Amino acid sequence: MSQVNPDHPLQIRLAMPRDVPVILELIRELAAFEKEPEAVRATVTDLHRDGFGPVPRFHVFLADWLGVSVGFALYCYNYSTWEGHHGIHLEDVYVRPEYRGRGIGRRLLSKVASVAVVEGCPRLEWNVLDWNNPAIDFYQGMGAQISPDWRIMRLTGEALCRLSERCD
Amino acid sequence: MSQVNPDHPLQIRLAMPRDVPVILELIRELAAFEKEPEAVRATVTDLHRDGFGPVPRFHVFLADWLGVSVGFALYCYNYSTWEGHHGIHLEDVYVRPEYRGRGIGRRLLSKVASVAVVEGCPRLEWNVLDWNNPAIDFYQGMGAQISPDWRIMRLTGEALCRLSERCD
């Protein structure tokens, strides 16, 4: 349990290894919110290895409200060959429904944006569902721009194996 | 100049620091092909630092045809909180127009897919322009799937600064 700040109920802080269980809880809640509760195969072991090993694969900010973690932002890095610099890819941002409307989401995003600025990253990027108009409005209100003509392609499972010529 | 393989004119190999100038040339050609020739601000210094430093920000496969680099695939890593594993994000794949139709693009993609399989990555992802039907058909022919309802959001420049609360 983190220290409660006497001046403000909300604290945004970098996650530590002991936070892995609550990060996984929040990941599962986000998946349930996206109507995919069964989609999360990640385990505590995975998140320990990938978030807190010698070369972290992701980074997490937690939002603590009166000492309880009620939201998170998880990001990793990408690369722009046009800019010649790494950028930030925000993978997840989530606030528990009962804690919304307090500016917690914006504070989480602001913290990730400050990492981008400090590291000289020219871009902060993330994906959004095209029917999620409240989210799009919120992001556009912060000055974010949607790329109308880019789509995401994904190769997984059997097709990935076939292309790799590494599987039977 | 790389060794010419006597058995086959095409060789796919990992790029080395000495390849940075040709990688930058190929990045510029790709930008021109995408009708954005002025968009590339990356320099040789940037690519050396970010691709070949102690913690590489990206990795490159080069396609050499009779010892000349005629195409490249540049990738970095992302993270799936559902899978609990890192994945591969393919940022650029490009073959010089006069060398197309020889299966070079597919061989480059196959090499990146083999990295995904060897590292246990469940996903290989990349972005495509929604009007680029030949590319979409090509990718779908390999078994890739398009995500119809996800869009990419991006925050840059002034708006990124404002959100970060780190700029004047």
Image (spheres, coloured by chain):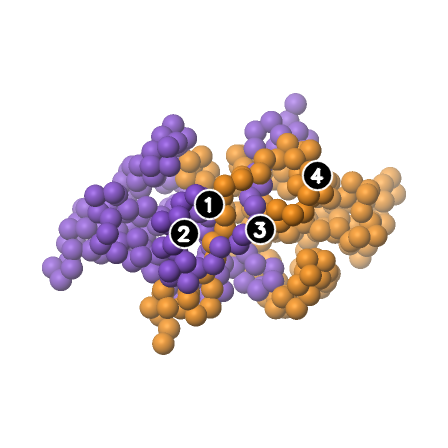
Chain colours: A purple, B orange
Q: CA distance from mark 2 to mark 1?
A: 8 Å
Q: Residues within 10 Å of mark 1 (few under 14, many from 20)?
A: some
Question: Label 2 belongs to which residue?
Answer: A136
- Could you tell me if the residues under marks 4 and 2 are in contact, i.e. CB atoms within 8 Å? no
Secondary element under disc 3, as helix, strand or loop, is: loop
Secondary element under disc 2, as helix, strand or loop, is: helix
| Mark 2 or mark 3: whose residue is earlier in sequence | 2
- Could you tell me if the residues under marks 2 and 1 are in contact, i.e. CB atoms within 8 Å? yes
Classify residue B144 as left or right of residue B9: left
At a point 72% along the width and 58% down the height, the residue shown is B33
| Mark 2 or mark 1: whose residue is earlier in sequence | 1
Classify residue B142 as left or right of residue A35: right
> Is residue A18 among the parts visible in the rendering?
no
Question: Label 1 belongs to which residue?
Answer: A130
Q: CA distance from mark 4 to mark 1?
A: 25 Å
x, y percent for residue B109: 68, 41
